[in-house]
Image: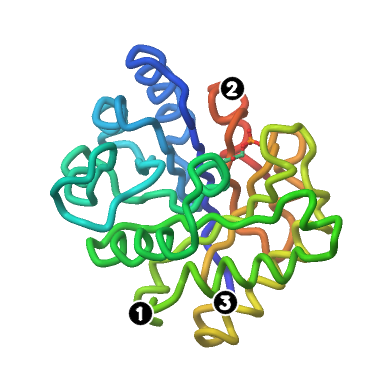
Amino acid sequence: MKRRPLLAGNWKMHTTVMDACELAAEIGKCSAGLEDRDVIIAPPYTVLSEVAHVLQGSNVLVASQNICWEDKGAFTGEISPTMLKSAGGTAALIGHSERRQIFHEDHALINQRVVGALRFGLIPIFCIGETLEERESDKTFEIIEEQIREGLAGVSIDDMKKMVVAYEPVWAIGTGKTASKEQAQEVHAFIRALLEKMFEKDIADSTRILYGGSVKPDNVDELMAQPDIDGALVGGAALNAESFCRIINFT
Ligand code: 13P
C-alpha cells in the first residue's frame, strides 16, 4: 500500500513571534507545489495562531506540541482541542519523549490525550521510543509494545484511520546520533505488525509511521527509502528554513 509521506517539524521551546513568522513564511514558500506529501509544523502555543495565519492558503498544516482531553475548564497550563482549532491547528503531538521524561507523563495520561484529540477530530501524532538503557538491555520491542498498547487503549479502528505514529528513539533525539536506517526500519516493521495484531491489516498498512531523532538533510533520503518509514518528525533541523526545506523536498 502506498502511504502519503508526512514531514513534520517540532519547534519545541524555540522561536519568538518574529522568528516564528519568518520561519513559517520560508517553509510555506518551499512547500508550495509539493502535492505528493504532507507537511506539518508544531510551533509553541504562543506563536501557533500567528504561524497558522502566515501559512493560511499554503499546504502546510499546524499542530500543537501537546493537547488536553477536555474542551475547557480548570486545567492550568493546558490547551484544549477547541482552542487549538480556533487558532488554526488540526493536529497534535502527544506522548513526546520530553513530555514522558521531563514532565513525567505516563501511559494513562497520554492515552487520555490521544482519546480526547480523536474525540475532537484532531490528528494525533502519537510519539513512542525507547531510551538508550532500554535498547542496550534488549528491551526495545517490549517498551514499544507497552507504549503502543497503553497509549492506544480504547481507540477504535475507525479512529485509527486518523492516527499518525512517530517512532523517536530517545537516544537519537538531539544527539546527532541517528538510528541507522536498518535499526529504524526494524522497529517500524515491528510497530506495523503490532498494529495488525491490535487492529487489522488495513489499519497496519495505511497508518503512517514517522521516524524522529536527528533527521537531517543528509540522512533523510536513505531513511525515507525504507519500506516502513513514511515520514519524519524533525526537531533541530526544523528550526532552520534551509535544512527543513531540504528535508521536506526529500527524494
Ligand atoms: P531532533 O531532530 O533535534 O533530534 O529532535 C527530534 C524530535 O524530538 C522531534 O520531535
* Residue 50 horizontal/vertical position (percent): 26, 25
Amino acid marked by disc 2: Glu
CA distance for labels 3 and 2: 32 Å
Looking at the rendered image, the quarter that the C terminus falls into is top right
**What residue is shown with label 3?**
205
Amino acid marked by disc 3: Asp
CA distance for labels 2 and 1: 37 Å
CA distance for labels 3 and 1: 14 Å
Q: Within the image, what quadrant is residue 79 found in?
A: top left
Mark positioned earlier in the residue sequence (3 or 1): 1
How did the renderer colour the structure? rainbow
Extreme-left residue of the structure: 73
Mark positioned earlier in the residue sequence (3 or 2): 3
**Crowdedness of circle 3 by 10 Å Cα count: few (<14), some, many (20+)?**
some
Contact between labelled residues 1 and 2, with CB atoms less than 8 Å apart: no
Q: Nearest the camera: 143 or 201?
A: 143
**What residue is shown with label 1?**
158
Mark positioned earlier in the residue sequence (2 or 1): 1
**Crowdedness of circle 2 by 10 Å Cα count: few (<14), some, many (20+)?**
some
Contact between labelled residues 1 and 3, with CB atoms less than 8 Å apart: no
**What residue is shown with label 2?**
242
Q: Nearest the camera: 11 or 37?
A: 11
Q: Residue at x 40, y 30 (%)?
A: 28
* Quadrant of the displayed image that contains ligand 1: top right
**Circle 1 — which element?**
helix
Looking at the rendered image, the quarter that the N terminus falls into is bottom right
Q: Residue at x 57, y 39 (%)?
A: 248
Q: Is residue 194 above or below residue 74?
A: below
* Residue 210 horizontal/vertical position (percent): 59, 55
Please give left or right for residue 35 compared with residue 80 in the image: right
